[in-house]
């Protein structure tokens, strides 16, 4: 989906009237469009061959920080869900001083 979006953006840029007015801009946008189409073709080949897992592993090996970011996001999501359930429990209880203090916390 990401590469399809990039191809759409590059084709939209090519249809920009500025490309007709500025040859340097047209050259850059054409190079960008070519790169995005090649990337999309590569991605479709990997996914189309059923090798999406290999592509993801390769991507993760090239960008190790991505894997760490995904793990941090998952951990944060679990923490959020745990705290959200606590908030819901306190909201269901009678509104006394200690409960309100814990709810605010």
Image (tube, rainbow, N blue to C red):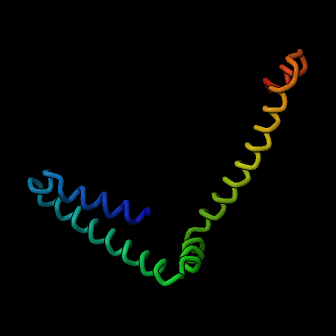
Q: Nearer the viewer, residue 10 or 21?
A: 10
Position of residue 5 measured from the top left corner of the image (x, y, whole percent): 37, 60
**Height in image: 100 above or below 41?**
above
Query: So how many labels did they put on this image?
Result: 0
Position of residue 15 measured from the top left corner of the image (x, y, whole percent): 17, 56
Quarter occupied by residue 105: top right
Quarter occupied by residue 41: bottom left
Seen in the image, is 59 located left or right of residue 69?
A: left
Q: Residue at x 28, y 61 (%)?
A: 10
**Height in image: 79 above or below 94?**
below
Q: Nearer the viewer, residue 38 or 88?
A: 88
Quarter occupied by residue 30: bottom left
Q: Which residue is drawn at 87% across and 24% down?
A: 93
**Height in image: 4 above or below 75?**
below
Q: Which residue is drawn at 66% across and 53% down?
A: 73
Position of residue 68 measured from the top left corner of the image (x, y, whole percent): 66, 61
User: Which residue is the extreme one toward the left?
Assistant: 21
For the N terminus, give its image quadrant.
bottom left
Seen in the image, is 66 located left or right of residue 43?
A: right
Position of residue 51 measured from the top left corner of the image (x, y, whole percent): 54, 82
């Amino acid at each position: 989906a990401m590469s399809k979006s990039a191809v759409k953006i590059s084709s939209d840029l090519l249809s920009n009237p500025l490309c007709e007015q500025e040859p340097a801009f047209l050259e850059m946008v054409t190079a960008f469009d070519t790169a995005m189409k090649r990337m999309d073709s590569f991605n479709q080949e990997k996914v189309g061959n059923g090798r999406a897992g290999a592509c993801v592993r390769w991507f993760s090996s090239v960008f190790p920080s991505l894997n760490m970011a995904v793990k941090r996001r998952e951990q944060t999501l679990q923490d959020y869900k745990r705290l959200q359930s606590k908030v819901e429990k306190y909201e269901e209880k009678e509104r006394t001083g200690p409960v309100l203090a814990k709810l605010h916390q």
